């Protein structure tokens, strides 16, 4: 199949030491050859695959030199897209780069759409869809761990697991169909109980994949964590402590923080999106009141709440209010200012929590003396992964929304099949159900998938990838 040749600037826009224009497609070598001069006048047409050539990009119309470059030649099929690829390494950013792009387009290629290089890799069968999606994850990964997990997907770990499960389902369907086609062998009765066991095993494997999806999502996007509490309890001091920099203004005046301050921080490779908020209290002051409205929104949206209490003051009705507003949320009570004579202790808080019928972790810190941070970080990680250890996290499977949705549908369908077996439905109906499960799962790796969905997935990429 002859495809057209595409080109794009593959490095970020802006100044840099080098920038790369990438071409992929059957004409890419001849197009670049038409605008490239080497000192010894060797052309690129005969150039061996995976070689680098020094020279200048020259406008063929007036022979003016545009840029001094290195050109990489990679011939199909051992390339990212499985087509001929040429990469022009020019000087970073600016006018020459755009001129080169214009020249290659005049030479007969068209501008690539976002993600089109990776889409070609998928369409040409070099990677499957789950692997292509891993490419987006690698680009967007917020921590080392996140990118390591994405990288293992790119190598095919998710695809392999899904394919194994798909193969098992096919085997089971085949067994059922044999039983249908040769009923005289009386296989049906024997097989059904075996099949139930196998299907339960598959259901468990799929559920396990789904379980790890939440951890994966956190690695991908970061956990939204709001620091909430009354004014002056030390919320901004806590933000600064966790960030290890003086990001938010801290004063002894209650009501210092008005707007929400958002920062991302990695705690042992887990990204947190930290929100410092305005202290919650009744106030007539307009700006502060607007700030408090934002605090309540942040509290609503947060997945984890660091509820800060000043141990040198009494608990008040506002503390009751905060706890009432955070029901059904993961909350860690941070008892701050333990360097001061204490009025509110761990016990006081336990009593309050008991009254509210809740059991929350309590961590004592002094933001001023920078003590207790390690404890807090440990408890945060425990809350995030709820006892699941992060060791072996490389084996974590990250699922995006699309993959998660497919998994959930697959499991649902599988359970309907199991239900059908129990109710004694005919074997051919069961086989149909199971085929549907297989089909849903294969959408994860992209074996059966609509054009439209493919376009939507690749449109998330940046141009040039
Ligand atoms: N002694 C002591 N003082 C602290 C500690 N943490 C914070 N403070 C002080 O408490 C005051 C309030 O701290 P902030 O961090 O501004 O408190 P906040 O909760 O952000 O306050 P608002 O933004 O007004 O809601 C400041 O004077 C801090 O220096 C601590 O651990 N010990
Ligand atoms: Mg503050």
Image (cartoon, helix red, strand yellow):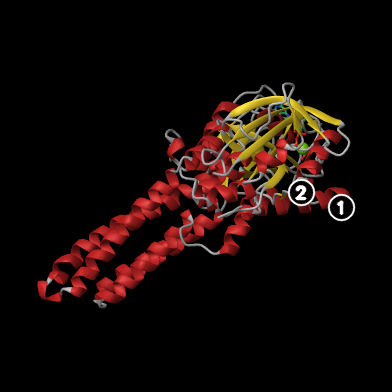
On residue 53, which mark appears? none
| Residue 245 seen by the camera | no
| Residue 412 seen by the camera | yes
Where 377 sits versus 6, above or below? above
Q: Which residue is mark 2?
A: 281
Q: Residues within 10 Å of mark 2 (few under 14, many from 20)?
A: some
The quadrant of the rendering that contains the N terminus is bottom right
Q: Position of residue 60 (x, y in %)?
A: 83, 37
On residue 284, which mark appears? 1
Q: Position of residue 160 (x, y in %)?
A: 39, 47
Query: Toward which corner of the image does residue 96 lie, by quadrant?
Result: top right
Residues under labels 1 and 2: Cα distance? 10 Å
Q: Position of residue 13 (x, y in %)?
A: 78, 38
Helix, strand or loop status at disc 1:
loop
Q: Nearer the viewer, residue 463 or 64?
A: 64
Query: Toward which corner of the image does residue 308 lie, by quadrant?
Result: top right
Residue shown at 52% from the left, 45% from the top = 216
Ligand 1 within 8 A of label 2's CB?
Answer: no
Query: Toward which corner of the image does residue 260 lie, by quadrant?
Result: top right
The quadrant of the rendering that contains the C terminus is top right
Horizontally, is 272 left or right of 292 in the view? left
Where 446 sits versus 62, above or below? below
**Ligand 2 picture quarter:** top right
């Amino acid at each position: 199949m002859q495809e057209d040749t595409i080109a794009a600037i593959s490095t970020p826009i802006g100044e840099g030491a080098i920038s790369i224009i990438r071409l992929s497609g059957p004409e890419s070598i001849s197009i670049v050859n038409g605008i490239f001069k080497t000192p010894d006048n060797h052309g690129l047409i005969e150039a061996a695959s995976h070689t680098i050539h020094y020279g200048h990009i020259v406008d063929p119309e007036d022979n003016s030199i545009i840029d001094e470059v290195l050109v990489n030649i990679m011939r199909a099929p051992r390339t990212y897209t499985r087509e001929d690829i040429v990469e022009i390494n020019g000087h970073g950013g600016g006018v020459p780069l755009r001129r080169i792009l214009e020249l290659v387009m005049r030479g007969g290629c068209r501008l690539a759409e976002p993600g089109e290089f990776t889409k070609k890799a998928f369409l040409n069968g070099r990677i499957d869809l789950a692997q292509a999606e891993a490419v987006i994850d690698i680009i967007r990964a917020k921590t080392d761990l996140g990118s390591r997990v994405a990288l293992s997907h790119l190598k095919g770990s998710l695809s392999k697991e899904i394919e194994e499960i798909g193969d098992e389902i096919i085997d089971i369907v085949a067994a059922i169909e044999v039983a249908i086609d040769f009923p005289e062998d009386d296989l049906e009765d024997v097989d059904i109980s075996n099949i139930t066991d196998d299907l339960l095993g598959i259901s468990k494997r799929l559920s396990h994949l789904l379980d790890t999806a939440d951890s994966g999502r956190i690695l991908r996007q970061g956990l939204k964590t709001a620091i909430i509490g009354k004014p002056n309890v030390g919320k901004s001091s806590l933000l600064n402590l966790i960030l290890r920099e003086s990001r938010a203004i801290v004063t002894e005046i209650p009501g210092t923080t008005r707007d929400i301050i958002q920062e991302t921080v990695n705690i042992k490779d887990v990204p947190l999106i930290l929100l410092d908020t305005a202290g919650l209290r009744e106030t007539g002051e307009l700006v502060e009141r607007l700030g408090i409205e934002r605090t309540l929104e942040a509290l609503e949206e947060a997945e984890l709440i660091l509820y800060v209490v000043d141990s040198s003051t009494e608990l008040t009705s506002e503390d009751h209010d905060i706890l009432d507003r955070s029901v059904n949320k993961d909350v860690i009570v941070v008892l701050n200012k333990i360097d001061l004579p204490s009025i509110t202790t761990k016990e006081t808080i336990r009593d309050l929590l008991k009254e509210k019928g809740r059991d929350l972790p309590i961590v004592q810190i002094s933001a001023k003396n920078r003590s207790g941070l390690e404890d807090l970080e440990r408890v945060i990680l425990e809350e995030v992964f709820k006892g699941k250890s992060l060791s072996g996290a490389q084996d974590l499977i990250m699922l995006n929304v699309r993959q998660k949705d497919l998994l959930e549908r697959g499991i649902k369908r599988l359970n309907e099949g199991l239900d059908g077996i129990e109710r004694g439905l005919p074997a051919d109906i069961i086989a149909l159900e199971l085929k549907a499960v297989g089909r849903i799962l294969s959408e994860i790796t992209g074996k059966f998938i609509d054009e439209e969905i493919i376009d939507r997935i690749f449109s998330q990429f940046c141009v040039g990838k």
